Amino acid sequence: MNITTEDIARGITTWIEKDLLDKGNTLQKGITVFIYLQSKPRIQGMVDNLKFFADDGVLDSTELKNNIISALEHIGGHYTIPLIDYNLDKQDITRIFNYIED
């Protein structure tokens, strides 16, 4: 499936709102919500860096997902988000891409 950086930003935003913001204890949740709200306007700009890898602004979602999962497996199968001590793993990447492709 062909996707744009706008699709990716939307998928990441949806994942954060539906899956990530309720992780951790009360303080961690509050800090995570604050950081998310402060950075939400910048998410698209961060994701736009992927345009370097795109042809005509379009990326193949299967290839991108597989490459991200391969990179994650290369570093041990997960990345710990320090603030909330949450392990981002293959299941999270799959959920993000489900949101992207919806």
Image (tube, helix red, strand yellow):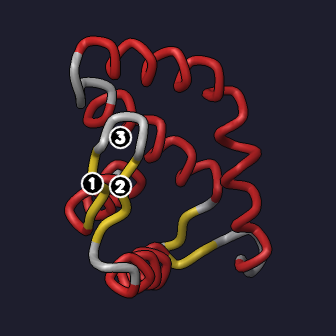
The residue at the point 22 percent across, 20 percent down is 25
Q: Position of residue 70 (x, y in %)?
A: 38, 86
Q: Quadrant of the N terminus?
A: bottom left
C-alpha separation, residue under disc 2 versus residue under disc 3: 16 Å
Against 89, residue 59 (above or below) is below
Mark 2 vs mark 3: give the one in front: 2
C-alpha separation, residue under disc 1 versus residue under disc 3: 14 Å
| Local SS, label 3 | helix
C-alpha separation, residue under disc 2 versus residue under disc 1: 4 Å
Q: Specify the amino acid type for callout 2.
A: Thr
Asked if the residues shown at circle 2 and circle 1 are in contact, with their CB atoms under 8 angstroms apart, the answer is: yes
Q: Specify the amino acid type for callout 1.
A: Asn
Quadrant of residue 4 within the rendered picture: bottom right
**Is 84 situated left or right of 12 in this image?**
left
Against 84, residue 73 (above or below) is below
Q: Which residue is mark 3?
A: 15
- Marking on residue 80: 2
Q: Earlier in the sequence, mark 2 or mark 1?
A: 2
Label 3 Cα neighbours within 10 Å, binned few <14 / some 14-19 / many ≥20: many
- Marking on residue 87: 1
